[in-house]
Image (tube, rainbow, N blue to C red):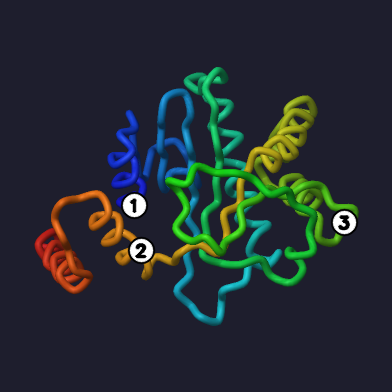
Amino acid sequence: AAVIGLRGMARRDDFILSTNKAGSGNFDDIQYTKGKTRYYLQLKHTDNPDNTKLAHLDLVPLLHQCFESFFSIIQDPTFNESESSEFIIYTNKQLGPKLFQHKRQQRMIDVIFKTCDTGEIFNFTPDKNKEIDVYTLLENSVKKSKEFSDLSPTEREVKLRMVSKFLTKLIMVTGQKGQSELDEVIVQEIKQHDAVEVSSQRYNMESRSEERRVGK
């Protein structure tokens, strides 16, 4: 949120930045609204050096949670269809071996969200290999859920159609900076756009001081 806010101000965007937005489910981490476009971000960081690959066992449950949030958001009467909405999963993980084989389409994204040039930005496209196809795996996961069993046949049909729509819209942003690395990105943004020079050591010292003050 700090990185995005600093960049938005530097670009003089007319924006609204929200965190922990109520009613957005898994897409409540960060919401950035600029003009008629609203970006919903789900952040998945890991600081575990042994857990840097994204595997099906982790991804499918995450996609299911995000899909339920997406479905709830677009069903809300306050959701504005005329506005452009981007749903993003942002992670410092890379694709695991199986997911790396999955068909995907490279996508463009507003540079305001990027923290690393070496990552990949894409959406999954249907894959003929049903063992790895996230469309098939997500649909099966949705069918097995209690929420699905409580629906009428017509509601079930509508919801299953939304699985493909969700995955077509969903943008995966992988290989980005982890949570522990973002302080340095913030420092660079301040140095680049502000007249005040701030050293990393001073910034970290002030951050810890502020955390202790808030903690009290």
Q: Is residue 114 left or right of residue 9?
A: right
Along the viewing direction, whichever of 83 and 138 lies nearer the viewer: 83
What amino acid type should be assigned to the residue bearing mark 2?
Leu
Quadrant of image for the C terminus: bottom left
Which quadrant holds residue 93? bottom right
- Give how far across and how far down residue 86 sits, in percent: 55, 37
- Give how far across and how far down residue 63 sits, in percent: 64, 51
Residue 3, numbered label = 1
- Give how far across and how far down residue 191 sits, in percent: 23, 57
Seen in the picture, residue 184 relative to 69 is either above or below; the reply is below
Determine the residue positioned at 55% across, 51% down: 89
Tell me the distance, in whole angstroms, between the alpha carbons under discs 1 and 2: 8 Å
Q: Earlier in the sequence, mark 3 or mark 1?
A: 1
Determine the residue positioned at 28% across, 39% down: 9
Q: Secondary structure at mark 1?
A: helix
What amino acid type should be assigned to the residue bearing mark 1?
Val
Along the viewing direction, whichever of 150 and 57 lies nearer the viewer: 57
Q: Secondary structure at mark 2?
A: helix
| Residue density around tag 1, few if under 14, some if 14–19, many if 20 or more, within 10 Å | some
Seen in the picture, residue 165 relative to 75 is either above or below; the reply is below
**Residue denoted by label 2:** 182
Determine the residue positioned at 74% across, 63% down: 99
Seen in the picture, residue 47 relative to 30 is either above or below; the reply is below
| Residue density around tag 3, few if under 14, some if 14–19, many if 20 or more, within 10 Å | few
**Residue denoted by label 3:** 130
What amino acid type should be assigned to the residue bearing mark 3?
Lys
Q: Residue furthest right?
A: 128
Residue 146, numbered label = none
